[in-house]
Each structure stands twice: as C-alpha cells, then as structure tokens.
Image (tube, coloured by chain):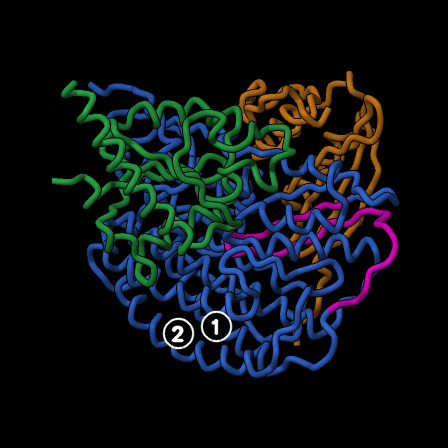
Amino acid sequence: MKMSKSPWLLHYDASSCNGCDIEVLASTTPVYDVERFGVINTGNPKHADILVVTGGVNYQNKPVLEQLYAQMPDPKVVVAAGICACDGGVFKDCYNILGGIDKVIPVDVYAPGCAVRPECLIDAVVKAIAILDEKRARMKAENKA
Amino acid sequence: MSKISVVPYGPQHPVLPEPVHLDLVLQDEKIVSAIPSIGFIHRGLEKLVEKRDYKEMVFVAERICGICSFGHGMGYCEAVENVMKVEVPDRAKYLRTIFQEMSRLHSHTLWLGLAADAFGYESLFMQTWRIREKILDMLEMATGGRVIFSIVDVGGLRKDVPDEMLAEFAKRLKDLREDYNRITAAFLEDDAVKSRLCGVGVLTIEQANDLGCCGPFLRASGVRRDSRMTDYEAYAKLDFEPVVSHDGDSYARCVVRIKEIYQSIDLIEQAIAQIPAGDVCTPVKGMPDGEYLARVEQPRGEALYYVKGNGTKNLERFRVRTPTFANIPGLVEVLKGQDFADVGTLILTIDPCISCTER
Amino acid sequence: MRQPIRAGEMMICEIDPDTLLDEVTKLKYSEWRLMQICATKTGEDSYEVLYTFGHGYRLRSIRLKISGEAKLSSITSIYPIAYLYENEMHDLFGIEIDMINIDFKGGLFRTGVKAPFK
C-alpha cells in the first residue's frame, strides 16, 4: 500500500499573520477540499507525513519547529506555505524574525503568495506527495542494500 | 487527596490553529490558575516604521492579522488621515464600511466553524466554511484577494467597486441569510452543543468591566458597548444597535456572534442602499506631523491605533492595542475553576487572535 | 438619530511622573477604564509613556516623560490588568517598572534581541 494515497498533514503556524493559516484550513474544507487526494489534517506530529509551515521563524518558535520536525516519522516532506515561510516576506526586516523556515529545517516545496492561494497550496501538496513517494522508495532501497 | 500539577498548554495544539501558550495550574481536573505567555508569533512589526515610509506601512498594518486584515489597514489609515487632516470621500467611507462588515462576517463564520470543530462536529465545521467561501468569493470579485486584499490606502481606497457589483452583492447576501438560518440552528438548539456551552465560563458584568474586556466577549456579559456607535467611516449614518446578551457564559458569546452576523448583513445592505457616487481617493500631500489615536471595532473587539509622526516620511511610533490583548485578563479569569476538558472551547470562545496580540 | 461621538481623540494631559499614581487613582474613582499604555522613544535615553482611559465611548489620555534610568511606578495596585501593558513596556523598551502585581521579569515577550525598542 502506498502511503501517498493518504498522506496526513500537520500544520504549524510559525509566526504567520493568520492569513496563510486560514487558507491552509480553507483548502481542507469544501470548495477546495484537499481531502479528495486522501490528505487528512491531523494535530499530532507522530501521525503526520507532510508538515505545512506558515510564517517565518522567530527566536521563540525555532526549537518548537525543530522538535515537531524531529517527532515526525521518516519519510517526511516539508511545505513552506506563503512568502513569509519561504523567505520572511514582509516581515523580513523585523528584529525578531530569523527568515524563512529553511533556516531551521529542510524544505521540499515552496508555495509563495501573500496570503498563499488555496490553488497554489494544493499544487504544493500534490508535489509533496510525489516527493514523499520518491523518499520512500529511496529508503526501501537503502534498507535492502 | 487532591494533587496540584502544572500542565503546559500549547504552543502546537490540535484544537487551536494558532500557537497559544498557557501554563495551567490544576487541582485534579479543575483549573486553579492560568499563566499566559507570549512571543511565539512576535515579529516586532511596530518597529518597521523606521524602515518603511508611512504609505508602505499600510501593507504592514494589514498583515498584523490575516483575518481582520482590512480593519487593521483601515485603523492605521484613519489615524494617519487624522494626523494629516485628509478628508476621505463619502463613497470611500461607505465602501470601507462594507468591506469591514464583510470581514466581520467572514471572521465570525470562521469562528463558528472552529467552534464546531472543537465540539467534534466535523460536518457542521465543513458546512460553515462552505458558507464562508461565498463571502470570500465576493471579496475576491471586488478586490482580487481572498483574505488579505490591500484595497485600503491613506486617503481612501485604491480602487472603486462598480454599482453593478454592489447590486450583485445585495442579491448574494439574501441567499447568504438563508444559508445562515440553516446552520445557526445547530449552534443554538442542539442539546449536545448546549451542554458544552451553557453555564460554562461565566464572566459577570462587573468582572467584564474591571478586566477591560472588549468585543463580543464583553457584550455577552451584558455591557452595551460597541465602538461602531462612534463616528467613523459611515457607521453614524447606519441604523443599528449593539448586540447584547446577559448570561456571560460561552453560549451567550456564541449567541452574540451569531446575531452580529445578521447585523453585519443588515449593515451591508443599508450601506449598499445609501452609497453615494463620486471619487474614492483623495490625493495625499506632505508628511505626517502630529499624533492621533484612532479606534476601530474589529470582529474581536475594540482596537486602538496610535500614530505619531515627526514631519518625515517615516513615522516616529506606530502602536496597536489589539482586542485579544485586552481580553487576556478576562480569559485567565474565565478559566479559573473550570474543567481541564473545557479549556479548548473556552479559549476559543474569546475568539483569540494570537497574531494580533503579539504583532 | 444617534449623537455622533468622535471615534479617536487626542485629549492629552501632561503630568509629572511623581503624580502618576494620584492622577490614575482620581481616574479610577471617576470610573474610567484603562484602555492601553504605550511607550514611545523620544530621543537618546528618553521616553514618553501614554496612558489611555475610556469612559463609555469617551477617551482621554495622560502622558509623562521619563529618562532611561528612572524607575516608573506600576499602576497595577489601582488597575490590576495593567500588568500586561507594563510587562510589555519593560520587555520591549527596557523601562524599569516598580511593584508590578504579576511581574514576568522579562519573560512575557521573549525576543531574540533584548529590549529591541530601546
């Protein structure tokens, strides 16, 4: 059974303005409905395959984000949703912002936009699913070897 | 034998999409006290005034919060306009009122959805958000953006909305009322929902006044105060009364928000019927010099915007007092003596916006 | 038709830092509620602090000027909810405040840079 048929998604709000957060939620509800790809929104990092992060990292939530990432089982994919998560966006120059989330954890898919549009996010999640499959195949091959 | 324990609540929590963090002191299953801590979304955007000029700051102000984005942009512009003595055209005032009420509609609908999700009513959550998309469609039609639409500018609006589109809005709002009638019954009459809300987290009228609460949280405790009754934008020309409930419990807060949804629809309809023709933007000359404290009623309560300019293009100080910040003492009070299992819904009943609070 | 009340206002009364508690007590007894406290940096090592109060829909403010080393007395004995604003002021501006009822000691806003507005 391929995991990519039903990847579970964990959403973490790093220091987003809520705009991207509600768009992430909106993509799981009717009209956009990413659940039709089998994606389910979960609150538990130990059940999650895809980590969707909104907002840039600040000093306070850096360890939280690292911990969430570490708690997710392999293989895992990270989606940076919104321009703030990609590189800091409008808050780039703020004293408390470190920058995009790739300063802290590796990012696989970047979905820009302020706020990120649900269409863009769904596209990013579909891309993430493909990467998830790749990572899984690689892990399997490594285990055999 | 009762045992005292401290439970950290958040920052990442399944019920709350935002990183709220509370340290809860529990005696068995009852909460003795709650200690809030802030800083997970602190960006420090007030300091950006040193790097951005007063016109660019409009975009930053809109990104204080993505849910009440329009209101923040409007509050900031109001403050700057008053400092610079700019008279905003009437049409822009009406349009701003319409956009602000639409933001309130979508914010309260969002809250209803999250509340349904917190009780475990998954399909009610989905239905509520389906309705919310209809409001977002209207916003997208008029501005091109769904949640952050950057239409407000110092001096008015960036763009006019044609009358035909406003007529179309009026038509869609009629259908929207029908939709709301269908879902609100589930919140107000369902026994299971009532058992989670009625009598839980009571805040008396004295407490609400002393703790400086605002917005629906305050009005649910019986205080008749809504900043929209003051004279800003077109509110003075519209006919409405603040929505008040007297029980002060979670159910009363839910009732107030639902009534405000209908009130907002009514306000938009009134504004569309009255809107005058004309320009939507006054050209702005010069630099802000002076100070002003503007006040705007956001979906979550009263927000204050303090602006101080010194005659250069960069402001000297921009400060926002957001409604959730003012509601924290109230929340801490409400949590005392409640069951641990109710914490999620109780935090939700103040409609927290952490991103506003921490800026 | 309703009587229009101005939404924003700049009714500011300048006071001496030593008379802060007296002024605030007077406001408390005439049933004004605390709406916000805001600090502004006005120059190298000098700040002004603005306290805004509301009564119904009316607003009024008091303002005082202090230097960086001066200790400001807390108004939490009169308005307990001021602790949030005062801790905020301490964390962001580095203004020392005396006798706060709930003192986070710099732990409310945990910023990467200490007192970034200083």
Q: Residue B354, position in %: x, y?
A: 49, 40
Q: In the figure, is residue B53 to the left or right of B178?
A: right
Dominant SS type (magenta): strand
Q: Colour of chain B?
A: blue
Q: Position of residue B61 (x, y in %)?
A: 64, 48
Q: CA distance from mark 2 to mark 1?
A: 9 Å
Rendered position, C35 above or below C39: below
Write the residue at 67% across / 38% down.
B46
Q: Nearer the viewer, residue C20 or B144?
A: B144
Residue B210 seen by the camera: no
Q: Residue at x 74, y 75 (%)?
A: B279
Q: Which chain is green?
A: A
Counting from the top left corner in percent of width and height, residue B132 is at 40, 63
Q: Chain of mark 2?
A: B
Q: Colour of chain C?
A: orange
Q: Which mark is residue C23?
A: none
Q: What type is the residue that disc 1 sits on?
A: Ile
